[in-house]
Image: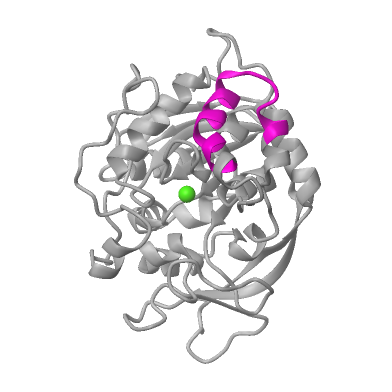
Amino acid sequence: MKKLFLILLCGSYFFTTDLIAVQSDDRTPIILDTDFVMPPHDDSMALMLAVQSPEIEILGITTVAGNDSVERATSDVLRMLEIANQPAIPVYQGADMPLVHEISDFAVGNYGNWYSNDAPPAPPGGFASTQVRNESAVSYIVRTVLSNPQQITLVAIGPLTNIAQAIRAHPKFAESVKRLVIMGGAIAQLPDGAGNMTPNAEFNFWVDPEAAHMVLRSGIPIELSPLNVSRKSALTKDWYEKMVAVDTPLTRLLKESLGSRFDSQPDGSWHMFDQIAMASVIDPSLVITKRLYVDVNIDHGISYGVSVGGREVWPGAEGAGQIDVQHDLDWPRFIEMFVERIQRPLPVKGEQTAN
Ligand SMILES: [Ca+2]
């Protein structure tokens, strides 16, 4: 952040008057919006990368239902921050359901537990001693962005429910966001553009298509990290062994969660998703982007939640926004950076990022 922002925000009808100071330095200030689950899930590895990267200042983390319930996202992220010696980073709980999408037999029979009402299981080592903040995710996101116009980068690596609600909550929110990096979607116009939930829909967009539709049409400057770029990654046993060769609390957690996978399938390889979106904030030169108009199908038919990208606007996509779409990745440089960051010593207690 280049300048010191000390702004008195006179609250709107539901945001309290608040004084927000954002630190002055060259780090990129972000809010991370996540459907977090502990490793081996990608959100947790994306957060490991973020907290170990001095280029980024995590102002706060907001949770949303997606991979699992929002309650599990919250308890797991609090525990992850404790393990990473970063318990001062504040966590705010967000939406427990998509805007419109309701539970179905298909949802129950396929990946994702976003509709769950089950109590979250204890994360590794037990529940964190720190608590979620007493403010909603949407209130926190809107308050922070409006207090620091054109300064905050949002990194959204789950369904876009919280971001859509923030856009709805205040008319100046969208124009006040500096940049939004999204893991979501799959673009058939580019190579490797099949879906992973339905034949053409990617999971995050499929869980909340109406939110994705609203966010992509909001006018916020967006960089999309879709399945096309995820499919340029390949986490093999060789890279896994390099990753866990140094013993730290983070690599120990990865060893416990990924080890059995590589033991049973030593020749297997896995894609990385949210980790790439986060890495692209740290070092934009890791990815190649193409500027496309991207829209999301919200008709409740065979293409519900499908993202469609085109070089020009096509019939039905009038009003779609032009965004940057990641489609290629410098995989060796990305995974080398990931391994190096994960292996760095953790901050000692008392020297954590405080917000
Ligand atoms: Ca995610």
**Image quadrant assignment for residue 94:** top left
What percent of the width, then of the height, locates residue 279?
A: 67, 44
Q: Residue at x 36, y 28 (%)?
A: 123
Helix, strand or loop: magenta stretch = helix
Q: Position of residue 241 (x, y in %)?
A: 69, 33
Task: Tell me if 287 is positioned left or right of 147 in this view.
Answer: right
Residue 246 lies, with reference to residue 242, above or below; the image says above
Which residue, as the protein is rendered here, is positioned at the far front?
Answer: 264
Q: Which residue is depicted at the point 40% across and 45% down?
A: 142
Q: Quadrant of the N terminus?
A: top right
Q: Is residue 310 visible?
A: yes
Front residue of this view, candidates 302 and 246: 246
Q: Which residues are magenta?
A: 241-262
- Direction bottom: furthest residue: 315
Question: In the rendered view, does 232 fall on the left or right side of 227?
Answer: right
Q: Is residue 26 visible?
A: no
Q: Is residue 248 above or below residue 98?
A: above
Residue at image coords 56%, 69% = 186
Residue 232 painted magenta: no
